[in-house]
Image (cartoon, grey):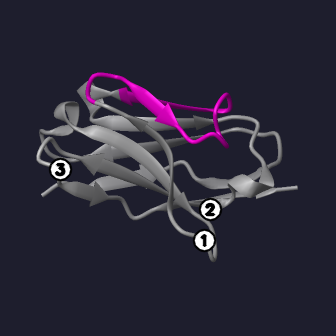
Amino acid sequence: QVQLVESGGGLVQAGGSLRLSCAASGSIFSLSAMGWYRQAPGKQRELVASMTSGGSTNYADSVKGRFTISRDNAKSTVFLQMNSLKPEDTAVYYCNLRTVFDNAYWGQGTQVTVSS
């Protein structure tokens, strides 16, 4: 069973930065695709950024140039560096791991609040 534990959320002013971390248990991390999703109140969960096991990345248009996803396979951890934050980035951010067998696992979520 894979467990994902997110950290790093909080309250920040517009224009500020936060770095989210997601630590995974188990031994499949390096072979898995990782992603960050977010869900704002009253909205559907949306993909923010993803990274394949080979290092290819994909970003939502709304965060391109501001957010960066990275991973440390030795520590089974994925990061999301968020710069130039905007109030519309306010949401609960979830870490996602997808295995080569297309099994998906989710973290518990971490709240990010950006004040104007």
Residue at numbered disc 3? 102
Picture layout, residue 43 above or below residue 36: below
Q: Which mark is residue 91?
A: 2
Residue at numbered disc 1? 43
Sooner in the amino-acid sequence: mark 2 or mark 1: 1
Q: Residue at x 26, y 57 (%)?
A: 105
Q: Is residue 36 left or right of residue 87?
A: left
The percent coordinates of residue 28 (x first, y second) are 14, 39
Task: Give the residue type that dot 3 points to.
Answer: Asp
Q: Does the segment drawn in magenta span residue 55?
A: yes
The percent coordinates of residue 59 (x first, y second) are 53, 36
Picture layout, residue 66 above or below residue 116: above
- Looking at the rendered image, the disc whose residue lies closer to the viewer, 3 or 2, is 3
The percent coordinates of residue 57 (x first, y second) are 43, 28
Q: Is residue 15 left or right of residue 64?
A: right
Point out the stretch of residues depicted in magenta: 53-71
